[in-house]
Image: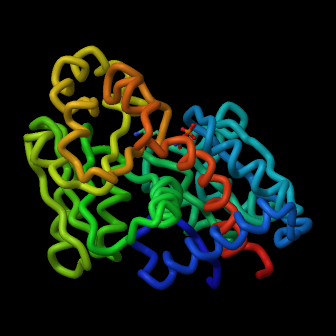
Amino acid sequence: MNKTDFLTLADYNRDEIDHLIDLAIKIKAEVKAGKFEPRCANKVLGMVFHKPSLRTRLSFEVGMHQLGGHAIYISDREIGFGKRESIHDIGKVMSRYLDAIMIRTFHQSDVADLARAAEIPIINGLTDLTHPCQVLSDLLTIKENDIPLDGIKVAYLGDGNNMVHSWLNAVRSYDIDFWFGGPEGYDPNTDLFEAIQMEGRGQARITRSASEAVAGAHVIYTDTWTSMGQEEEAAKRREVFPPFQLNEKLLALADSKAVVMHCLPAHRGEEITDEVMDGPQSIVFDQAENRLHAQKAILVHAIGSR
Ligand code: CP
Ligand code: NVA
């Protein structure tokens, strides 16, 4: 079946990721010049959310509007994914109405099952395992800040979650020296480190020292210590993660031109301090804006006309 899913960055090679970033830069420049090309005219995107969202929902919905198409929000309360109806049948039915589906859910395997059943492109809007839309937008934001995507050190502080996994998938394609700094017991999936060792352009390491992770880094990234679905562990996590808080003292160890990134939502005073989040090195709101432009590139690539 010839369709363009966007399930993980590991499915995309360097040229394809570069193409999406360049397309996003082009579309962003057009929008800033007041030009809205209807590249997805008459196309309809279904957006299925099993978890809350601000950026993902708005960027896909506004993105489809700006591309001359339409987006429909569908919560799992209506669908009953795998309960009211099988994922297979849902995929078949949705393919009869829609041109593409963006889904945010828990299990990566559900997204893969939907992609197998559907005859239309499936876009992963976050699972417990990965968040490829966010990292595509992050790469765009880094490039836009005149930081090359090769030959840099990226420090990631905190939990070995979906964000880290998508970063590790990107490190397969880019010559990034990626340092994950987090407490024992919360490491990312080790298979992804092995994949980088086998065939990656970059390299990835784990350290228990936040200072070692951040030393000389060009990009410092952090995310919540408690991801959606882990709320019951929040109190325990607040006890273990503080040594990895991104604060001014830690940031001083990075390259003097380092940028601070966070996918948001942030928990100010936990993984990041107000001073750093609102400080001159923070590009977190550019990141949030770029979700819109990156999403549009994914949509145009999947269902649009160039
Ligand atoms: N960064 C991100 O995906 O934000 P939302 O959870 O608000 O969509
Ligand atoms: N790791 C976070 C990312 C939110 C965009 C979560 O899954 O909740």
Residue 81, x across and y down, in percent: 60, 43
Q: Residue at x 90, y 68 (%)?
A: 41
Which quadrant would residue 76 be assigned to in this image? top right
In this rendering, would 267 be left or right of 54?
left
Residue 7 in view in this figure: no
In this rendering, is residue 282 above or below 134? above
Q: Residue at x 30, y 68 (%)?
A: 171
Q: Quadrant of the C terminus?
A: bottom right
**In-front residue for pair 139/145:** 145
In this rendering, would 145 be left or right of 20?
left
**In-front residue for pair 247/84:** 247
Q: Residue at x 44, y 39 (%)?
A: 280
Which quadrant would residue 234 be assigned to in this image? top left
Residue 238 in view in this figure: yes
**In-front residue for pair 245/4:** 245
Q: Residue at x 33, y 40 (%)?
A: 222
In this rendering, would 221 be left or right of 180?
right
Coloration of the structure image: rainbow
Residue 249, x across and y down, in percent: 20, 31
Residue 243, x across and y down, in percent: 15, 28
Q: Quadrant of the N terminus?
A: bottom right
